[in-house]
Amino acid sequence: MTDLAIFSKHKALTAAGAILAVPLAAWTGFSAVSHLIYRRSNMSTASEIYFRLTRNRHKLLDPIAFDNYILDQATTNEKTVDVPEILTFRTSVESIEMGGIQTFLLNRRDRNDRAVIFLHGGNFLRRPSIDEWKAADTIARKTRAEVFLPMYPLAPVHTHADAHKAVEAIYRNVVAEYGARNVTLMGDGAGGGLAISFAQRLHDLGLEQPSHLILVSPWVDITLGNPLVDEYEAHDPMLASYGLRKVGVLWARGTSDHDPLVSPINGEVRHLRNVLVFAGTRELFYPDAKLIYDRIAATGIHAEFHEGRGLNHNFPFYPTPEATRALEAIISAVTED
């Protein structure tokens, strides 16, 4: 090989190495930010970037856009819900009527010996997201449970009173079939707040608590009055207090916004049983979720707090290593005898 050929080959290899070094350096820097600064997986950092680009946080901040969104939802939320066509379910899914509302039942089998009532989130304004459908399917597939996903009444047409009425009817039906100790009540975001506010009523209703109460990023104070909310909101890529407080006024119609029916952080917690709370440190619901957990744990009730360090709202429902571990904890609770 001539000196010129050797030089040309060396030059080409050097250029190739330089080209490869750029993405490698970028990936190394990305990993360093994820693990050293945020203490989370690369997938979770990528997820937050995705949330900032695709989620509707801007609507929660824009008064005109949010008012229009509320008006649109007044019509949308009254329609019959269809299973998302883009999803492939690993369990059976059917739409039934229960408690006077449309309810989806996943994993109906004769040999099932337990049930999960899953109250979806969406700020009391929207139907289940793709992530919530996937979570319901995963829980149904990996447990011996039928999963009930109620399309409970939503704002702006309906209020907390309509939702509580529907959830009570469904809970009574499911408990009559399975027994309370074989039923898990769970919810995320707004659905998490509804789940615990309903659980707080069970004692007065003369009904037994579910075997587990699972709260994922629960919205437990409709006013978001905690002074720490602003600090956490600054890092939240998905939620904004302006729009949430506006929905809170609609949801609380007919009662005080401090009433436990809409702000369960002000309610009685000593009658609850086996409570699991999940919240990310980069979501504005975190301080209240931690506060209500501390109140529950202080009573001596079995309670667990799963902190998503550096993670976002509803972190157990996304395709990340942290979500896998969180869902395993949820599945373990559901299957616990």
Image (tube, rainbow, N blue to C red):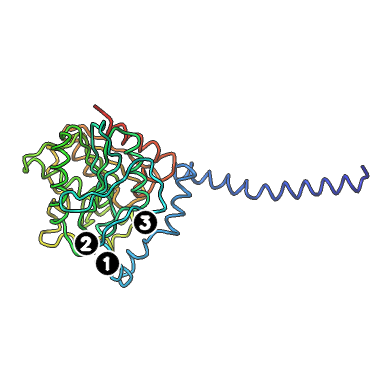
The residue under label 3 is 238
Left or right relative to 75: residue 11: right
Q: Amino acid at mark 1?
A: Ile
Quarter of the view holding residue 308: top left
Can you tell which mark lies on residue 70?
A: 1
Residue 230: in sight, yes or no?
Answer: yes
The residue under label 2 is 155
Labels 1 and 2 touching (C-beta < 8 A): yes
In the displayed structure, would residue 66 be above or below residue 96? below
Q: Residues within 10 Å of mark 3 (few under 14, many from 20)?
A: many
User: Residue 158 location in percent, x, y?
Assistant: 17, 61
Q: State the quadrant of the C terminus.
A: top left
Q: Residues within 10 Å of mark 1 (few under 14, many from 20)?
A: some
Q: Amino acid at mark 3?
A: Met
Q: State the quadrant of the N terminus.
A: top right
Q: Which-is-in-front pick, marks 3 and 2?
A: 2
Tell which of 172 and 274 is nearer to you: 172
Tell which of 286 and 138 is nearer to you: 138
Q: Residue at x 31, y 53 (%)?
A: 128
Mark 1 and mark 2: Cα distance apart in space: 8 Å
Mark 3 and mark 1: Cα distance apart in space: 17 Å
Quarter of the view holding residue 225: bottom left
